[in-house]
Amino acid sequence: MARSGTPLTIGEAAQALGVSADTLRRWDRDGRLRTVRDARNHRLVPRAEVERLSARPRRHRTGTPLSARNRFPGVIRSVEVDGVMALVEIEAGPFLVTAAVTRDSVEEMGLAPGMHATARVKATSVMIEDGGGR
């Protein structure tokens, strides 16, 4: 790969962006990509262009050493203990979050209705529902 300040070849830029060289040539013709030409009239892609095209929205930070990104601060509405398990319902703004936790956790943390608490969610399975609520 080229040095840090030098432009990339079409092939290098295509690999960095995960597209084909033909796609980059088409983007150049369409004005979606700014290229420069070398002494042999070959296209070169400035690194700034690769960075611009590969830019992704920045994800929010966890704000904590924990890896769970989704936090719902709120107030505990109810705690239902049954055997070794418990259900803790937190009112987080307009949302209700119910957590199934152990009885030991409820007792150790002293969880009770009216307490401020934060539900931290780390899930590998999250369903998205469209805005229609169907």
Image (cartoon, helix red, strand yellow):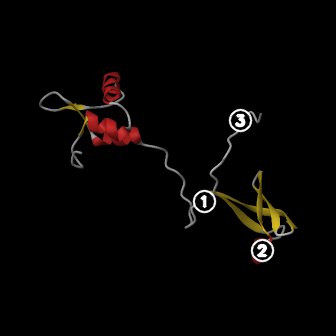
Q: What is the spatial separation of the Cα atoms under label 3 and label 1, in whole angstroms?
A: 25 Å
Q: Which residue is mark 1?
A: 68
- Judging depth in this view, the residue of 121 and 58 nearest the camera is 121
* Picture quarter with the N terminus: top left
Tell which circle, 3 or 2, labels the residue nearer the N-terminal end.
Answer: 2
Q: Is residue 133 above or below residue 87?
A: above
Q: Position of residue 17 (x, y in %)?
A: 37, 38
Q: Residues within 10 Å of mark 2 (few under 14, many from 20)?
A: few
Where disc 1 sits, the SS reads loop
Task: Check if mark 3's residue and mark 2's residue have beta carbons within 8 Å.
Answer: no
Alpha carbons under labels 3 and 2: distance apart: 38 Å
In this image, 55 relative to 5: left or right?
right
Mark 2 / mark 1, whichever is N-terminal:
1
Mark 3 or 2: the one toward you: 2
Determine which residue is flagged by label 2: 104
| Separation of marks 2 and 1 at Cα, in angstroms | 22 Å
Instruction: Report helix, strand or loop for mark 3.
Output: loop
